Amino acid sequence: MENAFLYSNVAQDDKESIRKIFMALTKMISQEPSNLNSPIDYFNYLLSIERGVLAARADAASLIRMRVGGCDCYGIDKFITLVDFPSVGLEGDTVDVSAFFAGYDSDKVITGTINGKPFETSEGGMVKHKIIIPKNKSELKLKGTLTIVNKSSVPNTEEWKKTIQILQPNK
């Protein structure tokens, strides 16, 4: 199956769902019971295969709906406002201010890394970490990941980067 993924254009976050569907079908079909003594037993066995195939079809249809935006993959029950703007400005300058809502599932824990280390705390839909600004540098480059799982427990990880400009005090 991994070779098939290598030569396909399957989205990375779909691979785990497809793998689960494939494994369920393979397990179900490869285990023909030995106690099929009557036509009714065999009929019941075929019905169980049909139920498994229908469940796999429903999972596949759900995966397709996720791809076209009709998905209920992430539960959003809380919102926070995020406002971003420069922390330093000069008199008379124009600054850009961006504001938006971020929705999150308060039942799911957001995890992440910052420069290779895990964030210290996760609360209220955000992960937090304190950083000591180094001396004698003009900027601090930060990068990391944020991960949340969807309703099917499939993790979704995104990378991020940010640079902090460091001001030097007057001596």
Image: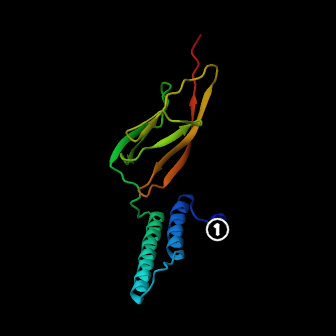
Element under disc 1: helix
Quadrant of the rendering where the C terminus is positioned? top right
Closer to the camera in the image, 86 or 31: 31
Q: Is residue 31 visible?
A: yes
User: Is 34 above or below relative to 22?
Assistant: below
Disc 1: CA contacts within 10 A as few (<14), some (14-19) or many (>=20): few
Residue 70: give x, y in percent of width and height: 41, 64
Q: How many marks?
A: 1
Q: Is residue 84 visible?
A: no
Closer to the camera in the image, 1 or 164: 1
Residue 37: give x, y in percent of width and height: 44, 86
Q: Is residue 15 left or right of residue 6?
A: left
Identify the residue at image location x=41%, y=85%: 43
- Which of the 4 image quarters holds residue 40? bottom left
Identify the residue at image location x=53%, y=67%: 23
Identify the residue at image location x=51%, y=78%: 32
User: Is 133 above or below relative to 145?
Assistant: above
How was this image coloured? rainbow
Identify the residue at image location x=49%, y=28%: 130
- Which of the 4 image quarters holds residue 145? top right
Residue bearing the label numbered 1: 4
Quadrant of the rendering where the N terminus is positioned? bottom right
Residue 88: give x, y in percent of width and height: 50, 26
Badge 1 amino acid: Ala
User: Is 165 above or below relative to 109?
Assistant: above
Residue 94: give x, y in percent of width and height: 48, 33
Q: Residue furthest top?
A: 171
